Structure formats: structure tokens, C-alpha cells
Amino acid sequence: MEAASPQRTGLQFSPQAFYLLLARDTRIERKAFESHRRCPVIVLFFILFLFVREFVGRVECVFG
């Protein structure tokens, strides 16, 4: 079985089109990644805030 040539399938391979498709794809992935990355940071700050508030409350109980 021989490989299908671009002439036989009617598809034209263009490097420019491939790079544009790749750039668009990575831009979409980067945007999705940034939105997913922002959520754990917010959760981390919230947990850190609760921990600091609890710790400060215990320190105040000890000293005062």
C-alpha cells in the first residue's frame, strides 16, 4: 500500500497554515492554562489567610 500523495487527496500542505494553526492552538491552551493556574493561587491564599488568622488568634490567647 502506497502513501497518499497531496495531489491524490487534494490537500495542499502549507507550512504557513500549519504554523498559524499551531500558534492559534497554543494561544487557546495558554489562555486556558492561565485561567486554571489562577484558581489554585486564590485557594492557596485563602488557606494561608485562614492559617494566619488562626495562628494570630492563638498567639493573642497566649500573650494576652
Image: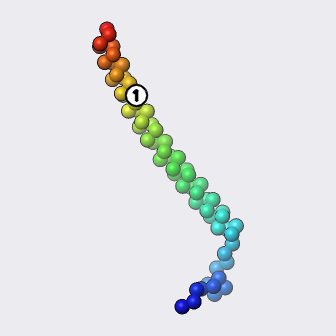
Residue that sits furthest to the top in the current view: 64
Whole-percent x and y of residue 61? 29, 13
Q: Residue at point 58% right, 57% down?
A: 26
Whole-percent x and y of residue 35? 50, 46
Q: Nearer the viewer, residue 2 or 10?
A: 2
Q: Quadrant of residue 5?
A: bottom right
Q: What residue does disc 1 label? A: 49
Q: Residue at point 66% right, 64% down?
A: 19
Quarter of the figure that contains the C terminus: top left
Dot 1 falls on a residue whose secondary structure is: helix
Answer above or below: position of 50 versus 18: above
Answer above or below: position of 12 versus 18: below
Q: Amino acid at mark 1?
A: Phe
Q: Residues within 10 Å of mark 1 (few under 14, many from 20)?
A: few
Whole-percent x and y of residue 63? 32, 10
Q: Residue at point 61% right, 62% down?
A: 22
Q: Is residue 44 left or right of residue 54?
A: right
Q: Nearer the viewer, residue 2 or 26?
A: 2
Whole-percent x and y of residue 58? 31, 18
Q: Quadrant of residue 62?
A: top left
Answer above or below: position of 32 versus 58: below
Quarter of the figure that contains the N terminus: bottom right
